[in-house]
Image (cartoon, helix red, strand yellow):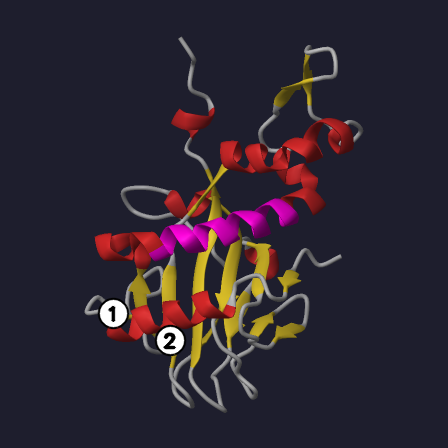
Amino acid sequence: MDFIEVYPNALPNDLCDRLILAFEQHAGVVDGQTGNGVDLEKKISRDLTLDSFVDLQPIRNELLGYTLKGAVDYFTKYSMALMGAVAVSVSDEQGQPVTLTPTNFATLGAPRADGLVKYLYRSGSINIQKYQQNKGGYPHWHSEQFPQNGHNEALHRVVLYMFYLNDVEEGGETEFYYQQRKISPKKGTMVIAPAGFTHSHRGNKPVSGDKYIATSWIMFNRAEQLYAVIA
């Protein structure tokens, strides 16, 4: 069990094509950044952040619908993510509150998985990224959790996710260091993996053509929301 899940055909071809078209036609495309800004030794890409532009909200929201389905499938399989870090209470068959556990999850948690995911988690900002043939890539081995000045949003990241928006026949793999696993880009495929150092990874240079992905993180909701007192 390596906790890396690959979901073929998770995104319709039409939506993949429209995301690429939106990227190619938008004035908001910029050089891709790492946690420390633009660093061409670590990452060479062109990026478009869907969350930053009003005109991109419809396609962003469409993409989030497919993201939720993948997240529900993932967290249902690895269900401790829905009851371990945050103890969740639900109603049992008699309407009495009971804490979710591995023992009762199949009957009390799995049917509520969609709602549990929405309660606990949110998506980070979604980037469309283009890695140019024989030039682009993210060769630096990296993970997704790190402290930041001014806020600590990155420490809320639980899993990374990406959708491959086109096929790349040679190169362009997402490579995981400890798992010794390479995933080749296939149009419409979704990849989900833990965000921590155990799943350090890199994006290899695409050789046969350009590579396009949509990528972000599933993150814990903020404590103010999770632990809000209902008056």
Drawn side of residue 76 relative to residue 102, left or right: left
Residue 36 covered by magenta stretch: no
Quarter of the picture containing the C terminus is: top left
Quarter of the picture containing the N terminus is: bottom right
Residue 130 marker: 2
Name the residue carrying label 1: 29
Looking at this rendering, what residue extends furthest in the right direction?
103
Secondary structure of the residue carrying tag 1 is: loop
Mark 2 Cα-neighbour bin, 10 Å: few <14, some 14–19, many ≥20: many
Dot 2 or dot 1: first in sequence order is 1
Say if residue 67 shows up in the picture. Answer: yes
Amino acid type shown at disc 2: Lys
Amino acid type shown at disc 1: Val
Q: Where 123 sits versus 216, above or below?
A: above
Residue at figure coordinates x 42%, y 84% from the top left: 210
**Range shown magenta:** 59-74
